[in-house]
Amino acid sequence: MNLTSLLNKETISPLLKPGQFVRIEPYNQYGYFQLPRNSTPEVLPPVRVNLATPFTTSLSAAIDTGQTSPISTKVTALDMQDLTLAQYKLVALDPGVRFEVYQPNTVARFANRAGPISFDQGSTMYFLENQMFGCLPELFLFADKTPPTIKAYSIDLDVVQFFARFVAFGYKYPLEFKEMPLDKETKQPLEPIALTVKVGERT
């Protein structure tokens, strides 16, 4: 396979370098921040999350006539310290389960005109094993302001699921708030902005 798309990235690289600025949306709730020149991005080792609980909370087997009820959980295990931006890649671990991400509670993080877009083991493991990291679902969190709500659905017609696990890994960026000077006419920032991310509205 010879792909030249930017999605076919064989490494996961930090999006911010020391001294660069980031705009966090919604702007009226967050604003401009800087990764200080004396700081660096830090690797976030994999965090494994199970939305089910063995023998306590399970996913019923899927039915061929409609969609079963999901397990819906506000996930705080990915929260960061104050003034810290997290960049996560998401990978599903268990076959027979698909996940939907909402940030905040009712706004689908991955969606198109047809509605929420889910991810599962079949797609994300393929991207991981083939080092197509740019195709993995990506989620940004700022401190503990907008923890995502993640829903797990069974796609197995035969088996009750006691595991609905995904893993999240990536980078974190310790930031400082920046009073950004704006152009008087255009209202655009006078400093170059290296990155704009959306973390969802605070609820």
Image: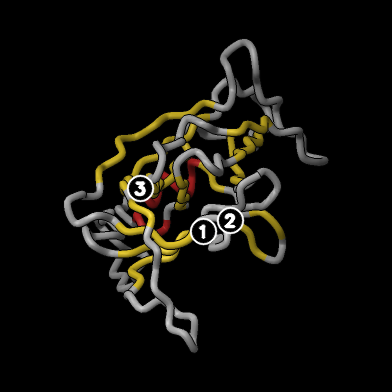
Image height check: is 132 above or below 71? below
Quadrant where the N terminus lies?
Answer: bottom left
Q: Compare marks 3 and 1 and give the one earlier in the sequence.
A: 3
Q: Residue at x 47, y 50 (%)?
A: 139
The total number of labels drawn is 3
Q: Residue at x 57, y 14 (%)?
A: 54
Residue 40 or 139: which is nearer the viewer?
40
Return the residue at label 2: 110
Quadrant where the C terminus lies?
Answer: top right
- Marks 3 and 1 in Cβ contact (< 8 Å): no
The location of residue 50, given as percent across then percent down, is 52, 26
Q: CA distance from mark 3 to mark 1?
A: 24 Å
Q: Secondary structure at mark 3?
A: helix
Q: Residue at x 54, y 47 (%)?
A: 119
Q: Compare marks 1 and 2 and give the one earlier in the sequence.
A: 2
The location of residue 75, given as percent across then percent down, is 55, 33
Q: Amino acid at mark 2?
A: Phe
Return the residue at label 3: 128
